[in-house]
């Protein structure tokens, strides 16, 4: 062991490893902080299983969104809850439309599977009918800086889309159901992070 530690090659290797480790450590601890409140917030949601990419894409889906100009996390939390309420409203309207269209095409269910799918879609619609007013309340609460009750509403809202998928069975749900699912996960993470600060 003593022979290896006195070898010039070992010393050079040790210096290389230590300087590399110091460079990596220095880069992560003294590197530039995220430049915007959006970057800072989205970078802090990992404990909620939300990646920075998912966060930014959910909050900034619309090019006219105020996500990049927000002055801080409270504005972004208000934006997230407004968006999740809007997404729930859109998903509810899409399911209503799909049910109406399906009823026009097939006035009476042709099979037991068709009847089950229609029943599942109506149950899904009921989930959204309950979620929309609760999410609108949450959006108003977060805009006023009250996070605790909104956090619980958003936590429950995360299960609406998956509940719909389970109830709809073979029926094809509108794409708005999936969009709502992603937005609900992000909005809950954002508001939960605010209520812990």
Image (cartoon, rainbow, N blue to C red):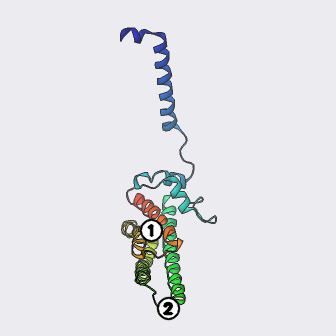
Q: Residues within 10 Å of mark 2 (few under 14, many from 20)?
A: few
The N terminus - image quarter:
top left
Report the residue marked by disc 2. Answer: 107
Q: Residues within 10 Å of mark 1 (few under 14, many from 20)?
A: many
Residue lying farthest to the right in this orientation: 63
Report the residue marked by disc 1. Answer: 142
The spot of residue 183 in percent (x, y) is: 49, 65
- Are the residues tagged 2 and 1 within 8 Å (C-beta)? no
Q: Between 17 and 112, which is closer to the camera in this rendering?
A: 112
Instruction: Using the numbered discs, state the Cα–Cα distance from disc 2 to disc 1 in whole angstroms.
Output: 43 Å
From the viewer's perspective, tell me whether residue 151 is left or right of residue 172. left
At horizontal 50% and vertical 21% (from top left) the residue drawn is 16
Query: Which mark is drawn over residue 117?
Result: none
Q: Between 177 and 194, which is closer to the camera in this rendering?
A: 177
At horizontal 42% and vertical 80% (from top left) the residue drawn is 113
Q: Label 2, secondary structure: give it.
A: loop
* Comes first in the chain, label 2 or label 1: 2
**Residue 37 appears in the figure:** no
> Height in image: 118 above or below 57?
below
At horizontal 54% and vertical 47% (from top left) the residue drawn is 34
> Height in image: 105 above or below 48?
below
**Residue 169 appears in the figure:** yes
Foreground disc of the pair 2, 1: 2
């Amino acid at each position: 062991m003593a022979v290896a530690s006195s070898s010039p090659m070992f010393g050079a290797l040790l210096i290389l490893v230590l300087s590399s480790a110091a460079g990596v450590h220095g880069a992560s601890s003294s590197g530039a902080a995220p430049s915007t409140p959006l970057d800072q917030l989205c970078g802090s949601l990992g404990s909620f299983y939300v990646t920075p990419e998912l966060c930014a894409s959910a909050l900034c889906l619309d090019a006219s969104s105020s996500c990049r100009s927000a002055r801080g996390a409270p504005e972004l939390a208000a934006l997230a809850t407004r968006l999740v309420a809007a997404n729930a409203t859109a998903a509810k309207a899409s399911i209503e439309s799909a049910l109406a269209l399906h009823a026009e095409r097939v006035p009476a269910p042709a099979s037991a599977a068709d009847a089950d799918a229609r029943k599942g879609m109506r149950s899904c619609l009921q989930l959204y009918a309950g979620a929309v007013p609760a999410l609108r309340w949450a959006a108003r609460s977060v805009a006023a800086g009250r996070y605790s009750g909104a956090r619980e509403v958003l936590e429950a809202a995360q299960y609406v889309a998956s509940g719909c998928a389970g109830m709809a069975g073979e029926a094809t749900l509108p794409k708005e159901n999936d969009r709502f699912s992603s937005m609900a996960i992000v909005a809950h993470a954002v508001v939960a992070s605010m209520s812990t600060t």
